[in-house]
Amino acid sequence: MTGHTGARKRRPARTAAVFLAASLPVAVVVGVYVFGRTHTPDYTKGLFGQHGVGVIDLKARLGSALMALAVVQLLLGLWMYRRLPGAGTAPRRVPPTHRLIGLLAFLLSLPIAYQCVTAYGVDLTSSRVAVHSLAGCVLYGGFVAKVLVVRSRGLPGWALPVAGGALVTVIALLWYTAALWFLAGSAPGF
């Protein structure tokens, strides 16, 4: 009987931990969304000394670098888990490289996101801009979810690839709806 009591005590604690882990990314998404909707946009906001079309060009290039890092992350993740065809077993340096590039991607995203949310807020006026704005909110919830999944034990085997894949997908969606759109000459500005 003692074994059953211990199992019962662990279940509520585990349920609370799972609830908290699931709630934290959602809270981040909602927090970014609410800030973006209630903050008064400052369309003159610059980034690293750039303003106007210059800031848009800079963000498009930084966003493209972020997209490249996301692709490298995806490939390294596939290699670590032996899902990269023909690559064999990943050397010991691949996991720390994966973590370092993930940190660099996160750090690279911060000035882009800061400028976007303070200059434009969460804008739902057109389909492309709405998708970009909402994906930007989801990005940081995705980062939180990925870190929580990596640090958690006892999750199903599919949780990590789903979290990582979702994060790469959100970055690709952000890149497609802004950086590629701008660099391809689809509009004079964002």
Image (tube, rainbow, N blue to C red):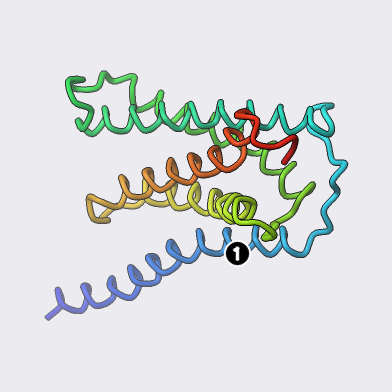
Q: Residue at x 51, y 63 (%)?
A: 26
* Quadrant position of the C terminus in the picture: top right
Secondary structure at badge 1 equals helix
* x 20%, y 79%: residue: 5
Decide if residue 151 is in sight here. Answer: no
Q: Amino acid at mark 1?
A: Val
Q: Is residue 127 left or right of residue 118?
A: left
The residue furthest front is: 186
Residue holding disc 1: 30
Above-or-below relation of 129 to 189:
below
Q: Is residue 152 above or below residue 113?
A: below
Quadrant where the N terminus sits is bottom left
29 vs 152, left or right, is right
Which of the pair 60/145 is nearer the observer?
A: 60
104 left or right, relative to 88: right
Q: Position of residue 138 (x, y in %)?
A: 54, 54
